[in-house]
Image (spheres, helix red, strand yellow):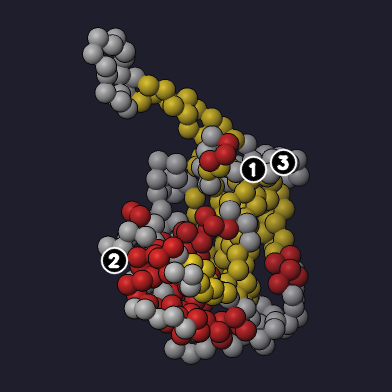
């Protein structure tokens, strides 16, 4: 694999239509919003979806969700112990972990488990992702739903209907901006390569493939556009903040309530010497 030579920045525009983009367990699992009503998707949620896509593409992943476990290990500690085989040197441990799992050399990982007897090891990953925010305030709708089956067994003599009530929350519509960068200096330390960067790009392009659930039906979340900048040097021709700000998104008719991505005008501010690859989502 060829080593990464140039800094990369990226921005993905994601639309959410009648879906719970990222439920907040501290707020009844309602979609996350800030104090001004703008929708949010946590960076942890985005990384989980990227990891899932990596697995779909056949890549080995360390942080596997329980329903996607592919190696029979019941915990991160068990997975690490099986792969590390008693390695105690921190540099060797980090090197082997990066060689073994794509998500470790991508996002980094802290290895500190109870059965490690005081041993711990940290890896800093080259790919950083911001918390996503919607470009306009979002409207959250809540529905009371009926479950036509008992969740618990009826007690003897209890006269209780099988119907139980529940709640379902969703964003009517929101266009979210996902921003991130890939640092060359950290990529050199973890062994993150050009091919790995291409894998991350493909994962972002297809972020919601094989991600459907009752809260996110197929087609309710999609990547509208992916902007991918590859600089001509390690440190970048421009700061990541300036590159991310070069994506301009504005409502076609100011003051209207958006109902689709077509209600926005998407444009790019020119950065001399740096042109992005513009990719449509699936």
Residue 48, image x, y percentages:
47, 59
Alpha-carbon span between mark 3 and mark 2: 42 Å
Q: Up-down: is 182 above or below 252? A: below
Q: Position of residue 132 (x, y in %)?
A: 62, 55
Badges 1 and 2: C-beta atoms under 8 Å apart?
A: no
Q: CA distance from mark 1 to mark 2?
A: 36 Å
Gap in Å between the C-alphas at discs 1 and 3?
A: 7 Å
Quick check: can you spot residue 105? Answer: yes
What numbered label is drawn on residue 33? 1
Q: Viewer-nearest of labels 3 and 2?
A: 2
Residue nearer the viewer, 127 or 256: 127
Q: Which residue is disc 2 drawn over?
A: 71
Q: Secondary structure at mark 1?
A: loop
13 sits left or right of 136 in the view: left
Residue 54 visible in the current orientation: no
Which residue is farthest front?
A: 117
Q: Describe the element under mark 2 as helix, strand or loop.
A: loop
Name of the residue lying farthest toward the left: 156
Q: Secondary structure at mark 3?
A: loop
Asked which quadrant contains residue 137, the reply is: top right
Q: Residue drawn 48% across and 32% down?
A: 168
Of 93 and 240, which appears nearest the observer? 93
Q: Considering depth in this image, is 165 or 204 the residue closer to the camera? A: 165
Residue 52 in the image: state x and y as whole percent: 41, 61
Looking at marks 3 and 2 on the same chain, the residue that comes earlier in the sequence is marked by: 3
Is 239 drawn above or below residue 73 in the view shown?
A: below
Q: Nearer the viewer, mark 1 or mark 2?
A: 2
Q: Residues within 10 Å of mark 2 (few under 14, many from 20)?
A: few
Marking on residue 252:
none
Q: Which residue is mark 3?
A: 35
């Amino acid at each position: 694999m060829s080593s990464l030579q140039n800094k990369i920045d990226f921005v993905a525009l994601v639309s959410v239509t009648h879906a719970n983009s990222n439920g907040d367990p501290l707020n009844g699992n309602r979609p996350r919003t800030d104090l001004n009503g703008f929708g949010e998707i946590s960076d942890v949620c985005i990384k989980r979806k990227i990891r899932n896509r990596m697995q779909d593409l056949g890549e080995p992943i360390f942080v596997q969700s329980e329903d996607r476990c592919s190696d029979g290990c019941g915990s991160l500690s068990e997975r690490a112990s099986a792969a590390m085989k008693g390695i105690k040197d921190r540099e060797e441990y980090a090197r082997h972990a990066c060689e073994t799992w794509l998500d470790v050399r991508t996002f980094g990982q802290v290895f500190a488990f109870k059965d490690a007897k005081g041993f711990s090891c940290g890896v800093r990953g080259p790919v950083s992702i911001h918390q996503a925010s919607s470009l306009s305030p979002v409207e959250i709708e809540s529905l009371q739903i009926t479950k036509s089956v008992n969740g618990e067994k009826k007690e003897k003599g209890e006269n209780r209907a099988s119907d139980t009530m529940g709640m379902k929350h969703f964003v009517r519509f929101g266009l979210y901006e996902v921003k991130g960068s890939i640092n060359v200096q950290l990529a050199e330390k973890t062994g993150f390569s050009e091919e790995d960067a291409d894998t991350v790009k493909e994962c972002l392009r297809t972020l919601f493939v094989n991600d459907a659930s009752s809260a996110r039906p197929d087609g309710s979340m999609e990547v509208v556009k992916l902007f991918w900048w590859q600089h001509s040097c390690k440190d970048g021709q421009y700061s990541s903040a300036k590159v991310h700000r070069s994506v301009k998104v504005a409502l076609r008719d100011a003051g209207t309530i958006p109902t689709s991505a077509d209600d926005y005008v998407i444009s790019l501010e020119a950065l001399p010497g740096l042109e992005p690859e513009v990719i449509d989502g699936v």
